[in-house]
Amino acid sequence: MARPRISINLAISADGKISSSPPRPSGWTSREDHARLLELRENADAILVGRGTLEADRMTLSVPGKTEQPLRCIVSRNGELDPELPIFHRAGGAIHLLVTGEFTGTGQAGVTLHQHTLAEFLHVLASEFHVRQLHCEGGGQLIRELAVLDVIDGFHLTLAGHTLFGGLGAATATGVTADFLPKSLGFKLTHYDPRPATGECFLSYEREN
């Protein structure tokens, strides 16, 4: 099935974790990392995020100063979302909610509801909404599902050498450590930008065929 090109953006600690246990909201990396996050959103036709990450980080998924805003796509098993989340009260692109299980939410005004598998939703974004570039900002479980589908084309990481999270319950880039992925995925390093002053390094990878 047709699908968008998919890129990922994450910050990881020196021990490979994307958050602590229990999860810590974003804000533990530098201002430069936050600026990079917004820069990476610039070329996206749509931004994808899991419900847990959306709620923890209070995300709006918007791009300051951009006339045509990317679609804002949320993935949830049951569609239950807090109506007070900032995304529902800040200007931005149209909001699309993918429910992968039984819908038990109440719905939100102005939100387009989809009930598909993740793979089917990717096809819908490409074929019906003309999304060519889809940018995912987590969380780890959603990225794991994309990795299992083998649909990740690019990976952007901020390696935060100043932080160690530890803990078996702390999530990695592909969720809380459990089973390995069905197969290894090959990527090549395309961008390396160390920032000694902040203890961080910006890295980008592209999928190898």
Image: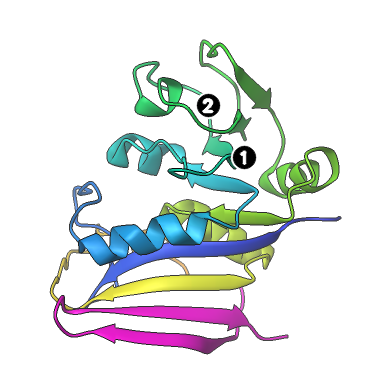
- State whether residue 78 is above or below residue 30: above
Q: CA distance from mark 1 to mark 2?
A: 29 Å
- State whether residue 87 is above or below residue 8: above
The residue lying at 61 percent from left, 78 percent from top is 183
- State whether residue 77 is above or below residue 105: below
Nearer the observer: mark 1 or 2; the answer is 1
Left/right placement of residue 60 relative to residue 47 reads left
Magenta stretch, residue numbers: 181-209
Give, as a three-letter code, the residue at label 2: Asn
Helix, strand or loop at label 1? It is: loop
The image quadrant of residue 99 is top right
Q: In which quadrant of the rendered image does the C terminus lie?
A: bottom right
Dot label at residue 78: 2
Helix, strand or loop at label 2? It is: loop
Q: Position of residue 190 (x, y in %)?
A: 53, 87
Q: How is the image coloured?
A: rainbow
Dot label at residue 68: 1
The crowd level at tag 1 (other Cα within 10 Å; few <14, some 14-19, many 20+) is few
- Give the camera-side residue of 30 and 128: 30
Number of marks = 2
